[in-house]
Image (cartoon, helix red, strand yellow):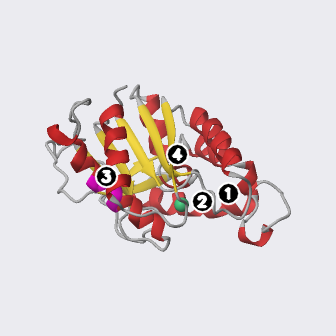
Amino acid sequence: MSLDLLAIAAHPDDVEQSCGGALIKMAGMGYRTGVLDLTAGDMGTRGTPEQRLAEAQVAGKLMLLRERQNLHFPDARLENTISARMTLAMKIREMQPRVVILPYWEARHPDHYRAAELGYEACFLAGLKKLDEYSGPHRPYKIIYSSLYANVTPSFVVDISAQFERRMAALLSYQSQYGAAADGQALFPQEQGIRERLGAIARFYGNLIGVRYGEPFVVKETMRVDDLVTLGVRTL
Ligand SMILES: [Zn+2]
């Protein structure tokens, strides 16, 4: 398997909220896309890990992913251990992504910033020839960080106006989380609330680049520009 773009996230339904639109858009352009969820959400208030895994597959189909896998690391207590880094590095060698999307490295939920650190270090390890004699080295060319929940100025925003509804449908595949079940209801805004919240966020980022809906990303390297004349986003 060789992917063009792989998103690594802490929990099933993280990518649907943060970078699903960009994944759908890239798949629509013919790129091979995938998602690797690190935990199955076993500490979640609602639903079982089995339900969430099944829902993640449905959402993955809606997002046009070639591949979606789950590493079953412990939810809510994700740790950047050598065994977790090695497991993830071996998976990266197998999936061979050119570009990796990680969560932004500062976050409220510890799993999210740990996933960023773990993902970065595993990408580095995956490139070491001597890491493992049975698999070839692979180092992703580029790491980009999904910064939707980080409240930082993005390096760039992807126009997801045409993908927003499909991303919304993918998120709502998680019936155990967003359906009308009774337990823990106060914690989980229902569909209308979710639609309003995610719509407002996507609208905010879209507005930054003069489109309806957008998803923000941060890169650590400087963005290169070759053509000044076709630069997007109007000044006046
Ligand atoms: Zn999460």
Identified at 21% across, 42% down, the residue is 131
Q: Secondary structure at mark 3?
A: strand
Asked whether 141 falls inside the magenta stretch, the response is no
**Does the rendering let one see residue 236?**
no
- The answer to the question of whether label 1 and label 4 lie on touching residues, with beta carbons closer than 8 A, is no
- The answer to the question of whether label 2 and label 4 lie on touching residues, with beta carbons closer than 8 A, is no
Q: Secondary structure at mark 1?
A: helix
Q: Counting other residues with Cα less than 10 Å from the Cα at mark 2, is it few (<14), some (14-19), or many (20 or more)? A: some
Q: Secondary structure at mark 4?
A: loop
Q: Which mark is residue 127?
A: none
In the picture of the structure, the residue carrying the numbered disc 2 is 198
Q: What residue type is disc 4 on?
A: Ser
In the picture of the structure, the residue carrying the numbered disc 1 is 195
Distance Cα–Cα, label 1 vs label 2:
5 Å
Res 142 → quadrant? top left
Distance Cα–Cα, label 2 vs label 4:
13 Å
Q: Counting other residues with Cα less than 10 Å from the Cα at mark 4, is it few (<14), some (14-19), or many (20 or more)? A: some
Image coordinates for residue 74, horizontal then vertical, percent:
53, 59
Q: Which residues are magenta?
A: 117-121
Q: Nearer the viewer, residue 103 or 234?
A: 103
Distance Cα–Cα, label 3 vs label 2:
21 Å
- The answer to the question of whether label 1 and label 3 lie on touching residues, with beta carbons closer than 8 A, is no
In the picture of the structure, the residue carrying the numbered disc 4 is 161
Q: Nearer the viewer, mark 1 or mark 3?
A: 3
Examine the rendered structure and indicate whether residue 174 appears above or below residue 26.
below
**Picture quarter with the C terminus:** bottom left
- The answer to the question of whether label 3 and label 4 lie on touching residues, with beta carbons closer than 8 A, is no
In the picture of the structure, the residue carrying the numbered disc 3 is 144
Distance Cα–Cα, label 1 vs label 3:
26 Å
Asked whether 119 falls inside the magenta stretch, the response is yes
Is tag 2's residue or tag 4's residue first in the polypeptide sequence?
4
